Image (cartoon, rainbow, N blue to C red):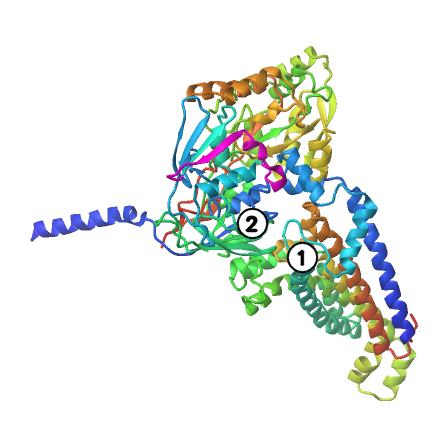
Amino acid sequence: MKATLRSLLLLLLFLVAAQPAFSQTPVKGGALTVCQPAEPPGLDPTANTEAAVDRIVYANIYEGLVKVDSSGGFLPGLASGWEISADGLTYSFNVRKGVVFHNGEPFNAEVAKWNLERAANPDNGNIHPEYFQGIETIEVKKDDTLVIHLKTVDALFIAHLAEGDAVMLPMKGFEKAKSNPIGTGPFKFEKWVRGDRVEMTRFDGYWNPFLPYLDKVTFRFIGDPAAQIAALKAGDIDVIGYIAAPESAMMLEKDKRFKVYAGTTTGEVIMSTNNLAPPFDNKIVRQAIAHAIDREAVVSLVMFGYGTPIGSHWSPGTPYYRDLTSRYPYDPGKAKRLLAEAGYPEGFEATIKLPAIYSYSKRAGEVIADMLSKVGIDLTIEIVEWGQWIDRIFKNKEYQLTLIGHVEAWDIGIYAKPDYYFQYDSKEFRDAYAKALQAPSEGEKEKWFGRCQEIITEDAVNGYLFSAPSLPVMRVNVMGWWENYPTVALDCTSVWLKK
Amino acid sequence: MLGFFVKKTASLAAILFLVSITVFAVLFVLPGDPAQIILGINASPETLAALRSKMGLDQPFVVQYTSWIGSLLKGTGGHSITYDMPVVDLIASRLAVTGPLALIAMAIAVVLALPLGIFAARHHKTPGDFAVMACSQVGLAIPEFWLGILLMLLFSVHWGLFSAGGFPGWATDTWGSIKALLLPAMALGLIRAAILTRLTRSSMLEVLQEDYVRTARAKGLKERTVVIGHALKNALIPVLTIFGLQMGQLLAGAIIIENVFTLPGLGRLVFQAIGQRDLPVVREVVLFMAAAVVIINFLVDLSYAMVDPRIRLTG
């Protein structure tokens, strides 16, 4: 009797202990409402670089041959696998069989070929035709293998195929992609109530029969930070994709009903510097500024501790990252000495132009103005409307300093363009970048992408501040949400709701 | 009367013409290349150039302006770049939110303001008058958005009676849509009630001093008849003027409240369109708003004549 009781108790104990493990098995069904702060200008990721577009449609409605997984690696998407030839010039993709678009059109290697050729032509409105212009020929083999020959080695080819610019559209019905997106993804588009929300429902014909778990996903556009929090607390939304005001993340973390992730993203927040505008054309001045900025303090004051300090234009979540944060330790004394060496013992006056739409930029601008004042640099802050920022700063380069987040992954190539708004012209960098792009092996890629990061750090091209945190906030029963954002997407494929 | 209509229509046409040129010119010289804003900062220069010529941005001012006016006269109007739909439909769908919102807000304002204003005037310099004035002073001092957030925290987060913003759409959920408008309308209405209360009170105070009111009272009329039938009618003219101005203002300017409650209204539409340089939308919404204000003022003019038959509509 005693023994039976004991074994019963043991069994009970085992069941109780095993409970959490059982409940971690994903459950199907349910509807999820996600707050995406900005409304996207159209729903075609091939026609717009705006992050809001990708955040809604990428991986949810549209897919490419290659996907990005939650840790930043490349996964088979519409290609079930691929092989790269030894010379790095030929890519053979095994196109997945039995894939259909939401409108019933089949997807195959021919469709993939048509998409890539379409993307390479700027008249079709793809924002990055240059990603595909290195393709020499595309062949479709009998067994539906897609063979792509490149003109030169491109180390970022797979990375580009995994971006929103390379998603597959159907050959019929692609014209309406902007307002009626049709893809192969786990969710099919239902409607876009302009100014309020985008609704999508589970696609029963999805190629992976086990996914998705959710029946419905709604993206609601709530821009006002206070209204976002109120909607979350009132139960109107389940997830805030990323919180604009980090101070409220702190508050929500203490609330048992919610959880907050502070993972990494592809975004680098930098103090962009006009390398041709005096006195910032002087490398020593830029290095002095790098010593005058306390990155840890910037992260704690601007982002309330969320975010990771960076030392170059590469975020810690992206492969080949090199930690260069210790190159310019915070040292106002050294900054002053360098300024004196550069011929500015008394410091100087300059202007920093901050885009009005980004609150982090305005906050960081104020903090940095204060830090630089301690070494004798007197910054005047000018707040600029977004359209004006694009015109005056980005296009016409009428600025000395500005402050903004660069969200695209693998974007260090912008330093190879002397007419980019940094106006940074370095043959050494261009050579290193060309070598990185043509690197035949992982080791070489590691070496040359690392070298690229080092060169711009050494030249202190911009003030490298921090990598933006992912900061999604959600109800505790939302499972499978990505902790890190290694690509610009709010992928709901494997998200499920705990009962 | 006919002359009045002709004159008003002519002035409407003239105003719209001037507004159309002004808004077009302002947007034309405004820094910020629409094509660049649409495609984002990292778009390739080739794609940019292709879009710019597709949008006609490489054409001279006169060509761009006349082709726009032409499309308006044909009745088609422009096509929203970001929303990929005709601007006319966009305005109609947004008006279906902002119109009812403004009406409910003004209804709340009037229902509160008239009785309170009359009460305060009749009990001039009593504690009741003082209380009403104090409340309206508070109403004037509170910013709209703050009142909106306060109402949201109370009714949505704390009591869970309303959803915290958003708009389900009339076709999907009619009752839900009305509910979605109540809190924002309250935020707008309470503040406007404060203004209208003060105005009604001072206007009533003035009229109640008039000789004819004394005569009416001397005739032995009931106080109720004196106040409602004799005094109020005359006191209403300035109140109506402000009512009209505010109604026009609400159609165009409920933008802050629309943002707080994430309502897909006209104000938010134009605000977002300016940021995204969706020029066809900005132009036509501004034109529409100008027309709405002119038409509301016209209706207010008509109502003067109804309230006070001595006013002749001669334009």
Which residue matches tag 1?
B86
| Residue A344 on the magenta span | no
**Residue A177 at x, y percent in the picture:** 56, 49
Q: Is A146 situated left or right of A39 in this image?
A: left
| Residue A134 on the magenta span | yes
> How busy is the neighbourhood of tag 2: few (under 14 within 10 Å), some, or many (20 plus)?
some
**Residue A382 at x, y percent in the picture:** 73, 34
Q: Chain of mark 2?
A: A
Q: Say what secondary structure mark 1 lies in.
A: loop
Say if labels 2 and 1 share a chain. no
- Which residue occupies the foreground of this view, B256 or B154? B256
- What range of the chain is rendered magenta? A121-144
Residue B283 visible within the image? yes
**Residue A386 at x, y percent in the picture:** 69, 40
Q: Going by the picture, which residue comes out furthest to the left?
A: A1
**Residue A477 at x, y percent in the picture:** 40, 51
- Vertical position of residue A438 compared to residue A143: above or below: above
* Picture residue at 70% right of the left edge, 72% below the top: B111
- Vertical position of residue A51 compared to residue A294: above or below: below
- Which residue occupies the foreground of this view, A233 or B159? A233
How many labels sit on residues? 2
Q: Which mark is residue B214?
A: none
Whether pointer 2 and pointer 1 mark residues with C-beta atoms closer than 8 Å, the reply is no
Circle 1: residue type: Pro
Which residue matches tag 2?
A177
Q: Chain of mark 1?
A: B
Circle 2: residue type: Ala
Question: Which image quarter is the C terminus of chain A in?
Answer: bottom left
The residues bearing labels 2 and 1 have C-alpha atoms spaced at a distance of: 16 Å
